[in-house]
Amino acid sequence: MSRPSRPSRRSGSTPLPALLVGAALLALAVAIPACRSGSTSGDTVTDVSIPAMDPQCAAYLRAMCDTITASPNKHLRILDTWDEPDEFGERIQLSHVREFVIAAPDKMMGVTAGDTLQRSFWKDGETITLLDRNENIYARIPDPGSIDDMLDMLVLRYGVAIPNADFFSADPYDIFISSIDRGRYLGLHLAGDRPCHHMAFNAGGVDFQLWVDADGSARPRKFVITYHDLPGIPQFTSQLLTVETLASIPDSTFTFTSPTGAEEVQLLPLLDEGPR
């Protein structure tokens, strides 16, 4: 299966079908020069030439991806935040906490809890189950194989994008680097209270920034996407609250048990693909 374009796989910010909805994310753009002026070096940047890829960016990006893929078993806890316009045209900030447990290459579960969504999914190697806990409905579809296969299938066939999906790939470095037009190292900046290597990248109409722990662990800490080609220049922010490896994970973690009174529904493809 051919891989979808990086922005559609990376964002999770396009309106989605009923079981994994992600509202269009509208937020104020963060000016890259303003972030640069906050560098701990105290340097002032004026008109400078931006190389296609700063070697420091490539090195820290590779180190981060090596950290993510070092163990097949991992646990991630992520805070996603965005601004959404209300009926008065005012921006209201909304957040979700997403928790993922992964047993690569073919098992994964995720739980989303927050201001607008209460959703879960399970991938056990044979079946993918999507549950809307608010509506108490769920849908099951055949598991196509690896986690990468699932992520691509959900986007291409069902229009379902899982936020931060690139962090779950078997080769996240290839996912990131294949779409980058340029990359800049901005210096040591804080993500929360942690000093991090701060980098800014451009991929077509999408800018994204990464903050990677500077303590030698190379853990990802923060991820910001800005869409310059969409109305309002929407922005999506993820803060990685927990990034840890696990010695082992019980198979029951990836097994769906239907809640009391839950109704099974059908998850329809975006287009009628005809007989298969």
Image (cartoon, rainbow, N blue to C red):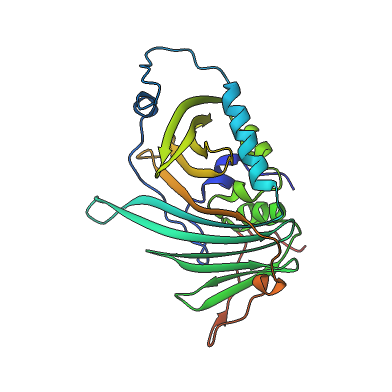
Q: Residue at x 67, y 70 (%)?
A: 254
**231 or 38: nearer the viewer:** 38
In the image, residue 115 lies at what x, y percent?
A: 37, 63
The image position of residue 52, as x and y in percent, is 57, 20
Q: Residue at x 54, y 26 (%)?
A: 183
Residue 80 vertical position relative to residue 188 in the rendered view, above or below: below
Q: Is residue 171 left or right of residue 212?
A: right
Viewer-nearest residue: 241 or 232: 241
Please tell me which residue lies in front, 4 or 186: 186
For this view, does 50 lie left or right of residue 23?
right
Quarter of the image where the C terminus is located: bottom right
In the image, 82 versus 41, the foreground residue is 41
Q: Does the rendering let one see residue 158? A: yes
Q: Residue furthest bottom?
A: 261
The percent coordinates of residue 224 (x first, y second) are 45, 41
Q: Is residue 89 above or below residue 257?
A: above
Q: Is residue 212 left or right of residue 32?
A: right
Residue at the (32%, 40%) spot, across then down: 28
Number of numbered markers: 0
Q: Position of residue 72 (x, y in %)?
A: 72, 54
Left/right placement of residue 86 relative to residue 264 reads: left
Residue 228 in view (yes/no): no
Please determine whether, in this image, residue 148 is positioned above or below residue 28: below
Residue extending farthest to the front is 215
